[in-house]
Amino acid sequence: MQKKAFLTTAVMAGSAMLLAIAPSMAQDKTTVTWFVGLGTGTNDQQRAVQDEVVADWNAANPDIELVLNVAASNAVAPDTLSTLIASGNAPDIVGPVGYAGSNAFSDQWLDLQPLVDSTGYDLSQFPAELTALYQTPNGLLGLPFAVYPSFIYYNKDIFDEAGVAYPPHEYGAKYVAADGTESEWNWDTLASIAKYLTVDANGNDATSADFDPTAIEQFGFVNQWGAERNDMSSFGGGVFWDPATNKVTIPDNWRAQAHWQWDAIWKDHFYPTATYEASTVLAPSSFASGHTAMARTHLWYTCCMTDLKSNWSIAALPAYEGHYYSTIDADTFRLVKTTKNPEAAFKVLTYLQGEASLKLLTVYGALPARVSDRQSYYDELSKRYPTAEIDTKVIEDSLTYAVTPHHESDFPNFQKGQDRFAAFRSLLAGDTGADMDVDAELDKLAADLQQIIDEAGAPAAVATMEATAEATKAP
């Protein structure tokens, strides 16, 4: 009895001690919140993997609890995040998120450089040109995570049927036609091939006098799922707003691209109008339909080509005035500058960028920024598309021709300005586009953008495109 009483007393005392310690332990535990939705990450498969990543972290790190907050959809994510920030409940980490998603909150991001310096985090694991994408006048606002270079997709079956030589895979190589004739692989060469590969219902190609542009069944080229600044930047980056003078000017190379695209749609007919792109001829999307010979788009388009039964491959981008320009989308994780626990949040961020990265990158369908992780991605891509010849050198080489400034670089009143660029693109390819005066509409675009930027007032902390262009020059 005495022994039992002693044990009971000891257990009670121990329990009291644990109760006394528990609040202290709870107070020492740091909570880090991770918000997902401004970019990819909201579908069910992605949510499941993100939950697994969070569970793995929490099991291994009892001192830092990671809490995941996934927006209901990408469409509502900006409003959800805005509400969280306004209510004083901003998350610590946001991502994955690209430039466009980040720019809507451009004044919210924490400079990571002091944390990189204090922890000795090794930036050399990433290519320097990718790290430079996040170097801004406001500091290092992200670390390389996922990259999506652009290049040319081409349908080998269409080329073979027409007896046309494939586009070159090597940057700097000539285009060698089927008869052995060589020419520079530039946008004019692409146009001449694309016309020949555009065919109407009667079997006439777009070089024929009998060609019927109202009955096209196969197109030669498209900027697949493009956006106007992205399309224009295929002819080189452009600084359309000068922060020093606050003046808007459409760069000459962007004007040249707009004219090239208008000619492609309305004069040479090898590029689909908006009506054709929405038609059953090009369902589920232009290149994936099997009825388009070439497309310029990003690596992320591999998300959506499982309906394509044709043999296909990828090739180098054409040159504009002797230079190559690959628009590159890039996703990262960002820290919100109001975080109360920057050191803990950075520790979690490096986990997402490091140990957890391959799980996340696979489910996001993204090329790892870390070169050492890429082969596993390529292996999975080849398994997914057994009829494709995926030349990984094209992907790697395209990264070295990154357009600067970035095609989604920030400017005042960003989203409203992006919407105005989109309206120009819709006009160019829309049913009334055939009658548009391209230069007059570009002048109107510039005037409207000027008004949109003026509405925002003089920004104190926007990462200017001019400075970004200098910071992001690829070697």
Image (cartoon, helix red, strand yellow):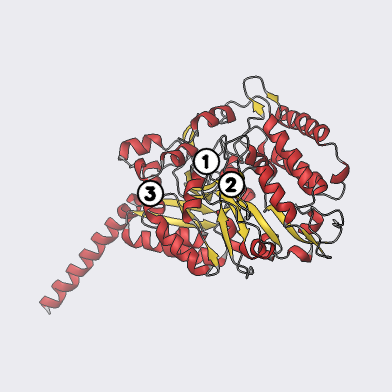
Q: Identify the residue at horizontal 60%, vertical 56% (top origin).
A: 166
Which comes sooner in the sequence, label 3 or label 2?
2
Q: How crowded is mark 2: few (under 14 residues within 10 Å), some or many (20 or more)?
A: many
Residue sticking out furthest to the bottom: 1
| Nearer mark to the viewer, of 3 and 2 | 2
| Residue 469 appears in view | yes
Q: Identify the residue at horizontal 20%, vertical 69% (top origin).
A: 11
Give the CA distance from mark 1 to mark 2: 10 Å
Regarding mark 1 in the picture, which secondary structure is present there?
loop
Q: How crowded is mark 3: few (under 14 residues within 10 Å), some or many (20 or more)?
A: some
Q: How crowded is mark 1: few (under 14 residues within 10 Å), some or many (20 or more)?
A: many
Of the pair 128 and 116, the residue shown nearer to us: 128
Q: Is residue 233 above or below residue 156?
A: above
User: Residue 370, how many percent across, how many down?
Assistant: 40, 50
Of the pair 58 and 405, the residue shown nearer to us: 405
Q: Do the residues labelled 1 and 2 touch (CB within 8 Å)?
A: yes
Q: Identify the residue at horizontal 29%, vertical 60% (top origin).
A: 19
Q: Name the residue under label 2.
A: 317
Screen quadrant of the C terminus: top left
Q: Which amino acid type corresponds to the residue marked 3 in the rendered image?
A: Thr
Q: Residue 350 carries which label?
A: 3
Which comes sooner in the sequence, label 1 or label 2?
2
Q: Residue 401 carries which label?
A: 1
